[in-house]
Amino acid sequence: MNKNLSKYALILLLTFVLVFLMNYIGNDARDRLSRALLTGFAAVVGLGIGLWIYSRRDREDDRNNFD
């Protein structure tokens, strides 16, 4: 497994667990499980897109290759 891929997967997993627990523990509504799952999943998708853009930016940096 690629080192960056495993690092990003760990970051995404920790983000999901943290956001899920914050929403599940802090919510008193009847549908708190579904809300916590959807919020955690949305956070992982958003962060995943951001990390993908960030990793592509580092690979295709032609501005600093002027030598």
Image (cartoon, grey):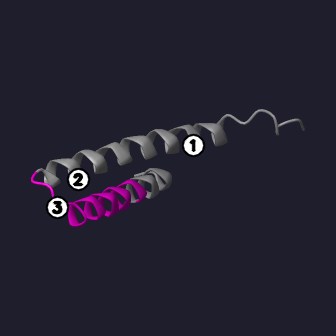
Q: What number is the disc on residue 12?
A: none
Position in image of residue 3 (x %, y %): 48, 56
**Numbered disc 3: secondary structure:** loop
> Is 29 left or right of 63, judged from the image as shown?
left
Q: Residue furthest left?
A: 30
Distance from the alpha carbon under mark 2 to that under mark 3? 11 Å
Whether residue 36 appears in magenta in the rendering, the answer is no
Which residue sits at x=57%, y=43%? 55
* Between discs 1 and 3, the one toward the N terminus: 3
> Is 47 left or right of 28, judged from the image as shown?
right
| Residue at the spot of label 1 | 55
Distance from the alpha carbon under mark 1 to that under mark 2? 28 Å
For the C terminus, give its image quadrant: top right
User: Mark 1, mark 2: which one is toward the viewer?
Assistant: 2
In the rendered image of this protein, does residue 1 appear above or below residue 14? above
In the rendered image of this protein, does residue 43 appear above or below residue 26? above
User: Mark 2, mark 3: which one is toward the viewer?
Assistant: 3
User: Mark 1, mark 3: which one is toward the viewer?
Assistant: 3
Which residue sits at x=82%, y=39%? 64
Q: Give, as a three-letter code, the residue at label 1.
A: Ser
The one of 51 and 61 positioned closer to us in this rendering:
51
**Numbered disc 1: secondary structure:** helix
Residue 29's quadrant in the figure? bottom left
| Residue at the spot of label 2 | 36
Please provide the residue range marked out in magenta: 11-30
| Residue at the spot of label 3 | 28
